[in-house]
Image (cartoon, rainbow, N blue to C red):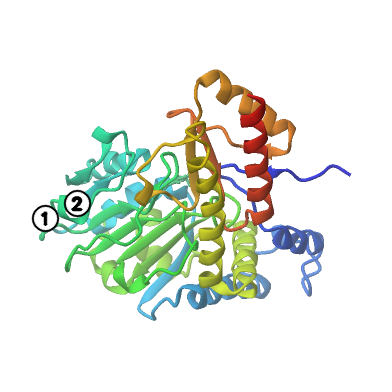
Amino acid sequence: MEKRVYNFNAGPAVLPEDVLKQAQKDFMIYPGAGMSVMEMSHRSKEFDKIINEAKADLKTLLEIPDNYHILFLQGGATLQFSMVPLNLMPPANKADYIVTGSWSKKAVKEAKRVGSVNIAASTEDDSFTRIPKQDELKLDPEASYVHFTSNNTIFGTEFKTEPEVGNVPLVCDTSSDMLHKKIDVSKYALIYAGAQKNMGPSGVTLVIIRNDMLSRSSDELHTYLNYTTHTAKASLYNTPNTWGIYMIGLVYKWLLNNGGLDAMYKRNLEKAGILYDAIDNSDGYYRGTVNKEDRSLMNVTFRMPNEDLEKKFIAEAAENGFVGVKGHRSVGGLRASIYNAFPVEGVNAFVDFMDKFKKNN
Ligand SMILES: *Cc1c(COP(=O)(O)O)cnc(C)c1O
């Protein structure tokens, strides 16, 4: 039988094997339904149970307070770049954005169509190799919200703690590090994440929104783009990605069954530690690309002595069952994405491969 590879893809990305096996087991007949999840009505009692359990399990995992709504939408994190300002920018019509990479820039581009954007900080002059320090932030206390990107999937940097923003609502794109550790949801007004990095397959966007934010959404907004549409209909205003929500629900159960987010964080620290140590102890053969203290636990970016060697490395890695280590096309180099579902054995095997490659080249 064909073997599964070690999948370092940035997203869509590796899923837990237990989850894939469970989905395979119930693929034809979801227990009690006589049909596949993909064939069910999104208004059936079976699907109602699936989506409600997914919400309840997420609430448990993150200890989400009662004054938040959990939504499963479509359009990716990309649609949230628009929905966030359309809903939350009024009435002041200005917002602060902390720019730490390509995704933050895309968020800014859409926000500018809605109102005025203050770049509270940007690390673009440093090629996004670091996260700005708190004292660099030029925050406007009257801003409607502050937006930041917790993990920069392409550059490999990550906020270790939330920026301090006083009483201004905090909004975060957590697409690529959602659920890699416990966060204090009560610090946020809105959190969004495309599912396909660390939570499930593509096609579902998680939005966690605090109740009081909903009063900002104008009736003039297009129905789908209005958060109150989705909170009022509990994510069932239109047909959601039923299969995707089912898969995400299985991932939440897998997290709960494996010790929850504190255990996951410990594992993530261990995995990233092994890989960064291998990079740092290679006498400069492998070079990390970002500030050490800002290194991402999810996307490990590095370079090699020259681009020919990088090409060779990528090709030989693939031959040895390590797939997806090519850096994003906009930055080059190498990137190993080691999300929750990526096994520690895979990191150890990859580090051995790196060592051998160095000796042979
Ligand atoms: C991948 C990614 C996005 C884009 O997500 P889509 O679901 O493709 O729209 C946005 N932000 C971050 C941080 C990402 O990693």
- Residue 150 vs residue 286, the one in the foreground: 286
In the picture, which quadrant includes the C terminus? top right
55 up-or-down from 76: above or below: below
In this orientation, which residue lies closer to the viewer: 23 or 339?
339
Q: Is residue 297 visible?
A: yes
Disc 2, disc 1: CB below 8 Å?
yes
Image quarter where the N terminus lies is top right
Image quarter of residue 150 = bottom left
Distance, label 2 to label 1, CA atoms, is: 7 Å
Q: Residue at x 77, y 67 (%)?
A: 30
Q: Relative to 343, is 216 on the left or the right? A: left
Secondary structure under the numbered disc 1 in the rendered image = loop
Whether residue 240 is visible, yes or no, is no
On the image, which quarter does residue 108 sit in? top left
- Left or right of 355? Residue 218 is left
Q: Is residue 250 above or below residue 140?
A: below
Instruction: Rate crowding at label 1 as few (under 14), some (14 to 19) or many (20 or more) other CA atoms within 10 Å.
Output: some
Q: How many marks?
A: 2
Label 2 sits on residue: 96
The residue pinned by badge 1 equals 140
Percent of width and height locating residue 137: 17, 52
Q: Residue furthest top?
A: 308
State which tag comes first along the sequence, 2 or 1: 2
Residue at 67%, 38% (x, y): give it: 353
**Up-down: is 148 above or below 264?**
above
Q: Residues within 10 Å of mark 2 (few under 14, many from 20)?
A: many
Image location of residue 184, percent across then percent down: 36, 72
Instruction: Left or right? Give the position of 341 relative to 144.
Output: right
